[in-house]
Amino acid sequence: MDEYPAGSLDHSVPFLLTLGTRTGAPYDAGLSAALKEQAVLIRSDLAPLESDQAHALLRYMQDRDASRLPCNGRDAAGRKYRFRIKTAERSLLLPPRRARLPEGFESPSPTVVLHSPYSPLSPISPLYPDGLVDTQWIRKHQDLVPSVLLCFYTLASDPTLATLCDNQIKTDVNNIRALLSQSGYKTRLAVVLLSDHVSSASSVDGVQDRLETIRRGCGLDSKALFFVPSSDSQEELDRVAENMLTTLYTVSVEYYRDLGRHSRKKRGRGIAPQPTVPPTSGTSQTLSLAGWNVRYDFKSAVFAEYRLEMDVALRSYEQAYENLLSSELMELIPSWSPRWNEARFLADVVAVRCLRCLLWNGQHSAAARRWQFHRERIADFVDRRGRGTNNYGWEAWEARWAVVMADLIDKVDIPELAPTTLRLYLPPEKSVMGERLQPWELLHHTGYWYRLAGKHLQARKVFAYAIPEDDRRSPSSSPASHVAKAAFAYDTYMCPDPYEEYPLGRAGVNHGQMIVDHLIRARSEFLKRRQTRFAAEVSLECARELAAAKGWQNIVELLRPVWKELPFRVEGWIAIAEELNWALRTAAAEVGDAELVLLADWELLSRDFAKRPNWHYDITRSLDGVTITSKPSVSIRDGQLRSFVSASFLFKNEEGKAGQSVRSQLSIKSNAHPESAPVVLNSVYLSFNGSLDGVILRHQENEQAMKTRGKATLAIVLLTRQADSDAQSEPETPDEVTSGVTLVGSADLTLRPGQTLVFNMEIPLREPGETRADSLTINVGSEAFDLRQSLTFQERGNTNLWYISPSATKPVAHPQPLAVRVLPRPPKMEVRCPVWKEQYYTDEPISLVFEVENGEDVEALAKLDVLLFGEKPPPFTVVIADHEDQTSSSVRSEETRLSGAPMGTIASSKSLAVRLRLPPIDRSSRYDLTLKVTYFLPTNPGTLISQTAVFQLNVVNPFEANYDLLPRVHPDPWPSLFDPEGVAGQASVDDTPHPPKGISQAWSLITRYASFASEPLRVTDIDIAIHPSPTSRCITTTKHTNLPASGAGRLISPKTIEVSTFALTAQKLTVDDRAPAPLDISLTIKWTRPDNNPSSDTSTSTVNTTTLPIPRFTLFGTEPRVLASVVHHRRKRGGTPLIALTITIENASNHFLTFGLAMEPSEAFAFSGPKQTTVSLLPVSRRGVEYRLLPFHLPGAGAGDGDGTRDGEGVGEQGGGTNEGGEEEDDDEGEGMWIRPGLVVRDKYFQKVLRVIPAGEGVRGGKEGFEVWVPRLREE
Amino acid sequence: MATAIPSIACLGNNPLHTSIFPSYDPSSNSFRPMRTPLQFSLILSSTLDVFELRSRQNAAAGVGLTGDFGLLHAVDDRLAAYGFETNTGTRFVVIVDMRGRRIDGALAAGLADGRDKRIAGAAAGLREGEMRPVFKAMQVAYIRLMQNPFFDPDDHSPPAGQGGRKITSRKFAEDMRRIGEAWTPGVTSL
């Protein structure tokens, strides 16, 4: 906007001029010299005021000068007045209302009409004869002719001077008024009177009178006279001043309204006025009516703008604009004429003022559109009628046009677009919401506009640099014909001629500086709104211009932050990063910033960037030609640059143990340009976080172990430890790792482009814990510089490749190859149980012996924790030599534990015996026994080491048994109901125990038990325990076991069945009681461990007792029983065996029973005895019937196993009771046969057949009746 | 002069894919890209600023859930950047050249008699939401790309935010080319 003449684009604000205060400087309105001599002088004769009050008032007014206020309706709405305020001391000059006739002009007619010197009608005006409007006219109203002339006077309070003073004021005011009216301007006159009295309260009435007198004397309106009472208070003064200005504002607006009305009236006349003097020069063309209309419209618009009637102003401006660009006006102006550029200028001014009106009303999108529209219009116009748009002049205008918009936006001060809102553009206003909008029509912030201007300036520069040399010569040194030709080829509207734009041989327009200025302004706007990337782009453009101007230092300052902070390289904008690098590198090399040069060169080595031909790509040569003061040292963080070196690290194993070493592999990969020089790394430093030591690899030329093939180079590096002091002296070691032991190795570290260096290392592990490979620092250096790049290892999912050979890789299986878990040093204490058995037995006290052996190099102070876990674990006792016995405590129902039993010191490679005692356990069960030895070594008292041993304790029942209870015939007679003694004994009811008198029965209990132990056990005794019954008595009469009588017992091997027989006699206490009685017996086995281990003497001495409960049997009962028993009579050797079969029928009931016995004849034997008989039994009685049997077929040697059922079935369930017999027959070596007597016993009354129960040896039950044993005939 | 798309890009924080289309150059009456790839890179990367600003504003205001960012900014009076963000954070940017296409016959005939260029200017403008079909089509293409089991999105937009490879799928590039060439203002489906 600054390029336009001053005042041409300013916002029009009502002009108020004060007169009569001391200002110190004379008032100069800036009248042109030509007009100055014709100017009208308005002068006050009174001395200017110098009082503080006057100055305070003036300052108050000046502070509220509105000419610099933001141009928007929002701010204006809150203001009661807007004034542009100027001050004159005693006099002011007004431009002449009528221009004089030019010198020497002979008036042809006496009625020459004189016009304003600003009108194209007056020859004195530059517009004469056919110009439109120029800046002079705008300035006339803005700067020269005030709307209000405010005169300051003192109202003297001194009564002696009052009248004189008042009269002086009256005279002066009248004088000024006269001069004003003489000048022809309608400037309103106003007077402000300042009282000089300190306390004027007493003479208020007097003052009022005087004021009235003065007002009348001066012929002033009541609105034009103001009185400022003398008062110290600023508020009072402010109030008066505020009132005054508000009043004056209405007066002023009225003034401009009159002017506007006047110009509208003139437009309404519809004729073009004739100039004072007809033109004689040029085309002698005068301004057409259309031109006059433009002029009048423009004037109306400006006056409307004074009144802040922006809509009216906009309408008038638009009208003026359309007319101006219409076919009748601008189309007719030839492009070579100066009027052409003047018209363009006027079009610009009108357009700017239109834009301001639109922005004033908040029509931002309309403004942007109007902006574009003007550009299109003018471009079209220039293309058609002017010199086209492909020249520097047009681009200069385009740039200017963009800057104008930016300035306007600045002036308007749109709060929605303020930087703090972070908004880039405004949404379209409502009126254009639905329309198709160009994106640019959404008003963007000024940064965009400045950047646009910068772009056009760049284009201007390009065009300017393309000017041929002939045109660049100054016209004085060029042939005239050429000058004439060039005059039409270039658009020089508001810009210099080609020989000034880009002169030959000397500096012309500094395009670069202009571009940079605009771009920097744009950049600051972008930065304010956090558009960092956009700002970087602008910086890059700036740098390009600066490079052309060799402003290297500026480039470095501009680009260094961009290069350092912006995420282009991280985000993969390679092209941008590359551009930045080269720009910065070039500048830094010129400036001598060696660090930047190194950094840029280092990064540019990466193959990600495009290769620049003819560039050396050698880091050692990067400082060639750079002047440096000291040796630069550069440290590069990981990720700071797009480094061409990448590194990875792998641990071969997921975990290792302290004291051992772990295999690991470090690979360093170069991604440099293929033709770049190899980079020699002086050293690399590998750091871990965790307990591992750092590793330094130093460069060593031409190592023999190197195997180079393909893209990778594999080397095995031996690491040696280096003491702290040496590590500190190493310059290449980063400072933070100076403490601690460092491992040092050496290898060839020449990194060729595209190659990978792989190093295999064995890294010793020292302390337990998790350790990660952290970063790699590589050092490159020469005499010229030091460079350090640090690389952080990244965990990558699937690319963890282990180099087996330079050409072969395999993936490492574990997921975190950067980390190794160092396990603690393994414990060397051992817990053993030398005689651990798979099974332990119930009812046996268990004693376990453990050995704790110290395998450590030194003695250890140990403690023991024992935990027994299972269902209802028994308490146990721990016996340790030289220590007290410790008994466990039960913490929960399923665990018993003993904690921290001291074991004392165990010397190295010695062992300590621990004995664990458990009481007999009565159920078979399973327990987990955990022994934990916790110890520490005196060499490292802080570290507790523990060793745990878990044993499984199986406690099983060693024996199982089954039982048979077989009936026998009791030999004693039953008590008789008719025996009074027996009955009488029952009657007495005293407590003394009576011998049982009831029915007695005999039984035989056969137990078969087996050992389920895993080893043979020695059974020393077997017995039964009969639980006493209240109604009966039962005793064991005989016991038959196969145990030796000595009591030493017999060794029972596992899973063999042993039989024991017990004869029982049961008797009811009384005869009356014949109810069934239960029999509860348990089997008691006394056993010991076989003493095959003489050393463990304790176990042999202990006799364990295992008690097995026998299921309940039932004795007695009232049902009748039929018992069969046989007796084999052998009277003589070789004689006929006679078998006596006795059938005993028992009637335990209270009834008289009759039984029928029938003996079937059989072919197997003959018998004697009743074939058919009837037996009657009294209640509680028994009777026997005897048969003698003689078998026909005696079992001989040949027919011995005719039935062959003896041995098998004797043990079976048939209950034949032949076990004893079997034994006997084994002794007799005899075999026999079974015969089946067909004896049927039938209850006569119930007609029920009773089963014959075998009761004794030689009789067994069968499916079809009982059978009788016929022993084998003895041969001898 | 009508609008055309001179560039379509698909961005994470890194450029995933960029297609550049030629614009009409009135001075030579030919079609050629109006900027160099570097300049387009700069323009595209500068849209990331706007995405960041806008997503902050959107998050504060609780709007913008559709992912359509609309006009990001007008780079200058010719080029404007429109943006879209998928809910996985991939951004689509379309740079529209407001004067990139030669006016074809019908439109030219309509404008020939109307001497007022404002009509032409208005016709060349864009309504809000007119870019939506483009983004929709891009998203469809992108989804199709993601459905390829051999395409690993983490390779291209690493969660750590660094690096990332470009999309090399020929089909995707072909889709982008089709979208870029077929679109004109008013097209509702691509």
Image (tube, rainbow, N blue to C red):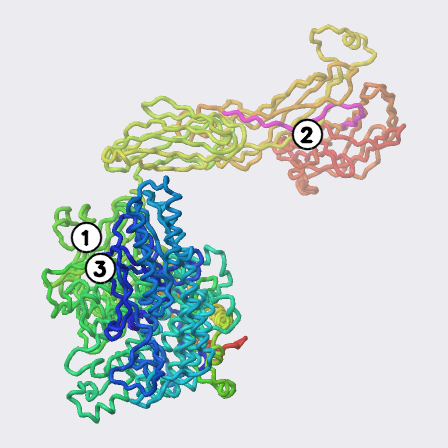
Tell me where residue A1013 appears, x and y as whole percent: 51, 35
> How dense is the environment of label 3, judged by Cα within 10 Å: few (below 14), some, or many (20 and up)?
few
Part of the protein shown in magenta: A1104-1123
- Say if labels 2 and 3 share a chain: yes
> How dense is the environment of label 2, judged by Cα within 10 Å: few (below 14), some, or many (20 and up)?
few
Question: Quick one: SS at disc 3?
Answer: loop
Q: Is residue A1272 above or below residue A180?
A: above
Question: Quick one: SS at disc 2?
Answer: loop
> How dense is the environment of label 1, judged by Cα within 10 Å: few (below 14), some, or many (20 and up)?
some
Q: Amino acid at mark 1?
A: Pro
Of all residues, the one furthest to the bottom in this rendering is: A481
Compare marks 1 and 2 and give the one earlier in the sequence.
Answer: 1
Compare marks 3 and 1 and give the one earlier in the sequence.
Answer: 3
Quadrant in which residue A824 is drawn: top left
Would you say A635 lies left or right of A65 here?
left
Along the viewing direction, whichever of A1226 and A1040 lies nearer the viewer: A1040
Tell me where residue A1208 appears, x and y as whole percent: 65, 39
Q: Nearer the viewer, mark 2 or mark 3?
A: 3
Q: Is residue A801 visible?
A: no
Question: Quick one: SS at disc 1?
Answer: loop
On the image, numbered disc 2 is attached to which residue? A1133
Whether B125 is among the magenta residues is no
Q: CA distance from mark 2 to mark 3?
A: 179 Å
On the image, numbered disc 1 is attached to which residue? A734
Numbered circle sitting on residue A25 = 3
Compare marks 2 and 3 and give the one earlier in the sequence.
Answer: 3
Chain on which label 1 sits = A
Chain on which label 2 sits = A
Q: Amino acid at mark 2?
A: Arg
